[in-house]
Structures are given as structure tokens and as C-alpha cells.
Amino acid sequence: MPEERVHHEHDVGYKYIFSHKETFLELLRSFVKKDWVNLIKSEDLMLMDKSYILEDFSEEESDIVYKVNICGQDVIFYILLEFQSRVDY
């Protein structure tokens, strides 16, 4: 019997890692060199439902979605992970 493998195993691993608020915040602070990033606290981040319906009624799903309120404004972060060895047309 062939060994069963997890489909998109790397995607699953990274989704798990970035579903932890502290890890996501560390990623954000590492790559976004703006003052507003330092206003975000991990306890203020809200992990959101990642499925949504587009205007043409097709369903989409992102990898990770966070919402945070910064200075009275809601900010949504969509994290899309793409690990590909070839172009997906």
C-alpha cells in the first residue's frame, strides 16, 4: 500500500505557523518597516474566517486573515502562501 502524504504539506505547515498571533506579528515587524506596525499588539489581532464570496458569487479562500484596529481604523491582513515549482496558468 502506498504511503499517504498530506496534500500541500508545506502550505499546511505555514498556515499552522502563521495562525499563531505572535509569529504573524514577528513576520509583519520583520518585513514592514513602518511606525504603525509597532502599534499592533498580539492580543489585538483577531484571526478571521478565511472564506468569502466575491462579487460574482464565486467562493474564495485565503490562507490566513487577520483583523486589527489601529488608531480607530480596522485593518485587514490577507496572507497568501504560494509554494510552486512551476507556473499555474
Image (cartoon, rainbow, N blue to C red):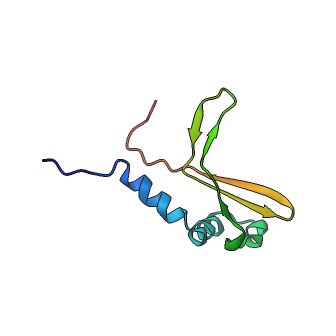
Quarter of the image holding residue 73? bottom right
| 4 with respect to 72 (left or right) | left
Q: Residue at x 86, y 65 (%)?
A: 71
* Above or below 26: residue 75: above
| 80 with respect to 43 (left or right) | left
Residue 50 coordinates in the image, percent (x, y)? 59, 49
Residue 45 coordinates in the image, percent (x, y)? 69, 65
Q: Residue at x 58, y 34 (%)?
A: 59
Q: Residue at x 55, y 68 (%)?
A: 20
| 41 with respect to 84 (left or right) | right
Q: How many marks?
A: 0
* Above or below 80: residue 71: below
Q: Nearer the viewer, residue 70 or 46?
A: 46
Q: Residue furthest top?
A: 56
Q: Residue at x 44, y 34 (%)?
A: 88
| 15 with respect to 27 (left or right) | left
Q: Residue furthest right?
A: 72
Residue 11 coordinates in the image, percent (x, y)? 44, 53
